[in-house]
């Protein structure tokens, strides 16, 4: 084997090596380049029937204002006031339907400074040991012992989307965003898979504003680290 | 050359290739792992003498409240009210000293929605063609035709820091942040080098809150993409 032959082999080895190490991430990216639509979640409240009765009066029923992108979820006409240990109020906080088994208040980190509430980052529904908060309604007040959270970054998708992206329910991924002068990679984004879900990444207002993106923006799914 | 020898050469080539491609980023990171302190900039105002006179009365002088981390810069006792096209006000906005040649209002994207001001991401001082905003003071009102910006992500450092990190004034880098449940990579972070500067990354409240970090947090410098 002469030097030229060896050189060719070495070039091939390097090319093969590059292909192998890049292959999985290339495939991952080609599927979804800027392909996931964003929905920004402003602060909102999920209520139990018991708390709805306290806040709005016995037997009260939620009034649907408009459907949200995830099937079965809707914004309600009803708004409430939040108060935290700062004694400062955040007014006009939207109630989302349908009713749930546990009441839950989702705020941003920015809101948490206004209210002086130490809300942890949590998956929706995982409220055990989360922050207390006071909800004021027209007919009564609910002092939640726990239930105030910063919603984690997450992506809703159908099983077929999950298959397409090569992820499964409960996986963590990351996304690249491309807001002008504000390019950002958001890590620790939870994948949620259900037949009922429409492909959409949910961000709170802090994440959206830091990234300079909003409803209808698109992000690219990458591997978590 | 037998198969074993060839295999050894190939292994060496791969090792050498890996070393080469990783070397620069490895060196880059070993210097600064979680090593850059963060300073969070809340909304604030820089004024000219002319605008100070209008807002507080002729011949008025700023009152230093406390020094900021960058030498020569200070927060003032004086606060003003901002009003934008929404006709909603943001009150208690701190004036920073010393006076400048152009007045400048730095807000967050979150603030820009409150005010309905279309503030672009800009380097401090680069206000040409930026957003108009109204500043209300105790003795007068200034209608800035331009000067309202979202400050770009940037890192102040001394020439010796710059040498240590292998960057120069005007370079763009990125940083990794490690806030709990909020790990984020912020791209397009501008390097600013001056003998007067202390090593510090400046973030606005949106970026800080999205990352779940605050004053005294530390970030890791990585290469921009």
Image (cartoon, coloured by chain):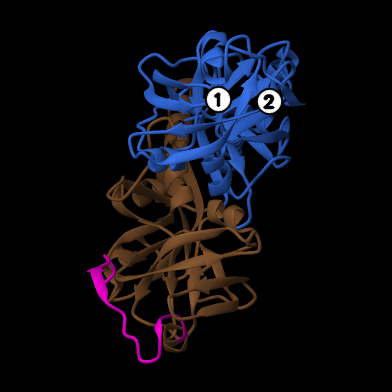
Chain colours: A brown, B blue
Say which residue appears at 37% left-offset and 62% top-offset.
Answer: A166
Q: In this view, does B162 lie above or below B119?
A: above
* Of residues A58 and A203, the one drawn nearer to the viewer in this rendering: A58
Say which residue appears at 75% left-offset and 18% top-offset.
Answer: B71
Q: Is residue A188 visible?
A: yes
Q: Mark 2 points at which residue?
A: B76
**Disc 2 element:** strand
Q: Residue A118 colored magenta?
A: no
Q: Where is residue A74 in the image (x, y as percent from the top left)?
A: 29, 72
Say which residue appears at 29% left-offset and 53% top-offset.
Answer: A37
Quadrant hosting residue A68: bottom left
Q: Where is residue B15 in the image (x, y as percent from the top left)?
A: 61, 36
Q: Name the residue under label 1.
A: B45
Assess disc 1: are there few (<14), some (14-19) or many (≥20) residues with their C-alpha within 10 Å of its C-alpha. Answer: many
Quadrant hosting residue B147: top left
Spatial separation of the CA atoms under disc 1 and disc 2 = 10 Å
Range covered by the magenta-colored residues: A54-71
Q: In this view, does A35 lie above or below B218?
A: below
Q: Which of disc 2 and disc 1 is earlier in sequence?
A: 1
Mark 1 vs 2: CB contact within 8 A = no
Q: Can residue A177 be seen in this view?
A: no
């Amino acid at each position: 084997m002469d030097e030229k032959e060896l050189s060719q082999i070495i070039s091939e080895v390097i090319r093969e090596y590059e292909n192998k190490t890049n292959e999985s991430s290339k495939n991952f990216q080609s599927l979804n380049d800027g392909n996931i639509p964003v929905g920004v979640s402003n602060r909102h409240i999920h209520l139990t029937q018991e708390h709805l009765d306290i806040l709005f009066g016995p037997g009260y029923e939620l009034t649907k204002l408009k459907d949200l992108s995830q099937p079965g979820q809707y914004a309600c006409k009803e708004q409430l006031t939040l108060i935290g240990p700062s004694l400062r109020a955040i007014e006009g906080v939207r109630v989302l339907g349908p009713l749930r088994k546990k009441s839950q208040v989702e705020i941003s980190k920015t809101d948490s400074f206004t209210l002086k509430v130490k809300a942890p980052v949590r998956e929706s529904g995982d409220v055990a040991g989360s922050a207390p908060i006071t909800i004021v309604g027209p007919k009564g007040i609910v002092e939640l012992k726990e239930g105030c959270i910063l919603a984690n970054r997450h992506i809703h998708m159908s099983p077929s989307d999950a298959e397409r992206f090569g992820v499964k329910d409960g996986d963590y991924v990351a996304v690249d965003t491309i807001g002008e002068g504000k390019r950002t990679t958001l890590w620790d984004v939870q994948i949620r898979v259900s037949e009922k879900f429409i492909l959409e990444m949910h961000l709170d207002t802090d994440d959206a504003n830091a990234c300079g993106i909003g409803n209808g923006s698109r992000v690219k799914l990458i591997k978590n680290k």
